Image (tube, grey):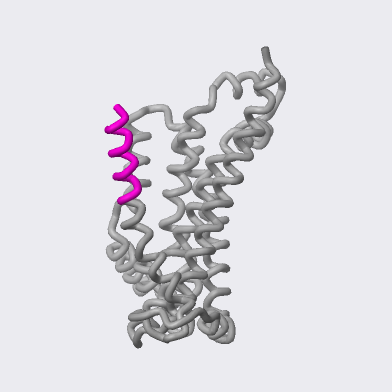
Amino acid sequence: MKRNRWSAKLYLVAVFAILYAPIVYLVSYSFNSGGTMRGFDGFTLDWYKEVFADTRLLIIVLNTLVVALLSAVISTILGVIGALAVHRVRRSRNRNALLALNNVLIVSSDVVIGASFLILFTLAGVKLGFGSVLLSHIAFSVPIVVIMVLPKLQEMNPTLLDAARDLGAGGWDVLAKVVLPFIKPGIFAGFFMALTYSLDDFAVTFFVTGNGFSTLSVEIYSRARQGVSLSINALSTLLFLLTLLLVVGYYWINRRNGKAAAGPLEGRP
């Protein structure tokens, strides 16, 4: 048993080392004064200063954050509505069909999704830019929110709804005071996942981005094609830290909600 445990731990260490080694390499060389990734000559913050001194890049960062926040908020609202609609379907065959349609955008290739949106916007006469990127991010984020919220709805005891109705609560009161508070962890999880996916997406955004509008992922790709510059490392490091903060924030809120839910139960006999 002990040997199996050590083997499992070593396997996990090896997996995480392989996953995070490129990120550590990228981050460490963002502080290299040599200007290349072939040898570390000394510590410097010049590449970060170069990033913050680039006005065009700061505008792109603002574009990325606006798109991510708007798409996360809108997709969370639509995803909650979609999860409620799927949960209300009684026949399992119809429910499974709706879930299959919902999961298409999750399992489909990003290249296929991006090309499909590009063809759709071209045929519809939609100008590529902020609007097309926002609509695309909302579209692929909604199924993620549905997947996050639906399990919490399935965990909810139907007797809670019956008790609320017996006490005189209307349909809106049941939704606002019983259902939404119960599924709040799933809503937060869906929001943070949608926000993270929007910040990190490249393939779909690359297809639907027009002239004069760009996001961080597309900008990093464009700069990397022009040649190796450690400002790309600095920019990628900042983006990684932002994503890491979002993940930590999600777990902190989830843990806090778990403690708040467990608190009243601890006092019961």
Judging depth in this view, the residue of 88 and 219 nearest the camera is 219
Residue 215 in percent (x, y) is at: 47, 74
In the picture, which quadrant includes the C terminus? top right
Residue 70 in percent (x, y) is at: 56, 62
Residue at 50% across, 79% down: 43
Tell me if 38 is positioned left or right of 241 in this view. left
Does 144 appear in magenta?
no
Q: In this orientation, does residue 132 appear?
A: no
Q: Quadrant of residue 94?
A: top left
| Labels in figure, total | 0
Q: In this orientation, does residue 31 appear?
A: yes
Tell me if 175 is positioned left or right of 28 in this view. right
In the picture, which quadrant includes the N terminus? top left
Judging depth in this view, the residue of 242 and 142 nearest the camera is 242
Residue projecting furthest to the top: 269
Compared to 144, does 169 lie above or below? above
Tell me if 251 is positioned left or right of 224 in this view. right
Residue at 32% across, 37% down: 6
Residue at 63% across, 40% down: 256
Q: Quadrant of residue 56?
A: bottom right
Where are the magenta residues, as a range?
1-14
Compared to 269, does 30 lie above or below? below
Residue 149 in percent (x, y) is at: 49, 40
Judging depth in this view, the residue of 38 and 97 nearest the camera is 38
Compared to 97, does 15 lie above or below? below
Compared to 110, does 15 lie above or below? above
Judging depth in this view, the residue of 26 and 246 nearest the camera is 26
Residue at 52% across, 44% down: 81
Residue 46 in percent (x, y) is at: 54, 84
